[in-house]
């Protein structure tokens, strides 16, 4: 599969001056983790860029020369739907993987690729605050547990021809496209963490990363 990484965010919730894709996580850009994990597992990577795209391009050209990366640049904000539609013009494979830059996961791409239908990857969410349960009338605390429910983890696999017919030139894939699609659920039981805010980044740094992302 060719792969589109949505990496055009400003990173305003990161409390950082860098574009979101270049914000540091354990001394490396968030984008590094995605590019390194995908390397050798997909055909071509297309970065869908907007905010300060030139800085991201320069970074990739300097530090990821060994990877097949192309760039789709928005001249104005197009939303996730419009950004994907523009980036799809650079995709050559019939099936396309789409990833949010700030969702780091060790999803088995070979297994995902075998699903013939359009698919959404889901994972167990971590409660951002402590859970309080009651036992015999008294509080029992559980600090930020992983819940048994499922949420989208920002990874999707689509049949290109089906997807492009539904995408707006400008708008949201979540609100304008997903309700019109039949999405197969791919349940991911492995590692997934969102790095959408500075607090998220701080917690990932505190908890550490698995070996596949360079952790211990």
Image: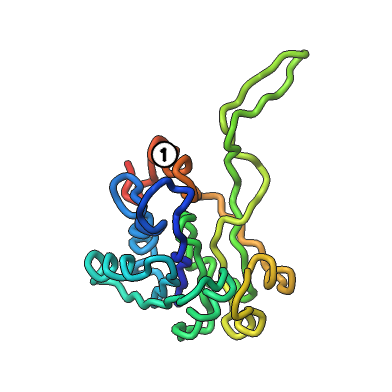
Q: Position of residue 140 (x, y in %)?
A: 66, 19
Q: Is residue 89 above or below residue 111?
A: below
**Residue 33 visible in the snapshot:** no
Question: What residue is rendered at 64% in x and 74% in y?
Answer: 117
Q: Locate residue 147: give its quadrant.
A: top right
- 54, 38: nearer the viewer: 54
Is 104 positioned to the left or the right of 127 in the image? Answer: left
Task: Choose top left, top right, bottom left or bottom right for residue 166.
Answer: bottom right
The spot of residue 198 in percent (x, y) is: 44, 43
Eyeballing the image, is 34 above or below 61? above
SS category of the residue bearing label 1:
helix
Point 53% across, 84% down: residue: 94
Measuring from the top left, give residue 10's x and y in whole percent.
45, 59
- Please tell me which residue lies in front, 146 or 202: 202
State the quadrant of the C terminus: top left
Q: Residue at x 49, y 58 (%)?
A: 107
Q: Which residue is mark 1?
A: 202
- Colour scheme used in the picture? rainbow
Residue 37 in view in this figure: yes
């Amino acid at each position: 599969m060719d792969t589109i990484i949505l990496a055009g965010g400003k990173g305003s919730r990161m409390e950082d001056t860098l574009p979101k894709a270049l914000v540091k996580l354990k001394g490396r850009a968030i984008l590094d983790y995605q590019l390194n994990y995908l390397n050798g597992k997909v055909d071509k990577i297309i970065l869908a860029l907007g905010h300060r795209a030139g800085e991201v391009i320069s970074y990739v050209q300097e530090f990821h020369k060994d990877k097949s990366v192309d760039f789709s640049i928005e001249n104005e904000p197009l939303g996730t739907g419009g950004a994907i539609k523009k980036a799809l013009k650079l995709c050559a494979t019939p099936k396309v993987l789409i990833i949010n830059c700030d969702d780091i996961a060790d999803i088995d791409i070979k297994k995902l690729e075998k699903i013939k239908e359009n698919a959404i990857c889901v994972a167990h969410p971590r409660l951002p605050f402590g859970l309080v349960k009651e036992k015999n009338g008294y509080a029992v605390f559980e600090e930020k547990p992983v819940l048994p429910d499922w949420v989208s983890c920002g990874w999707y696999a689509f049949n290109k021809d089906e997807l492009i017919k539904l995408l707006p030139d400008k708008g949201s894939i979540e609100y304008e496209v997903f309700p019109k699609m039949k999405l197969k659920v791919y349940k991911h039981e492995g590692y997934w963490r969102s790095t959408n805010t500075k607090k998220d980044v701080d917690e990932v740094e505190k908890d550490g990363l698995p070996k596949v992302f360079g952790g211990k």
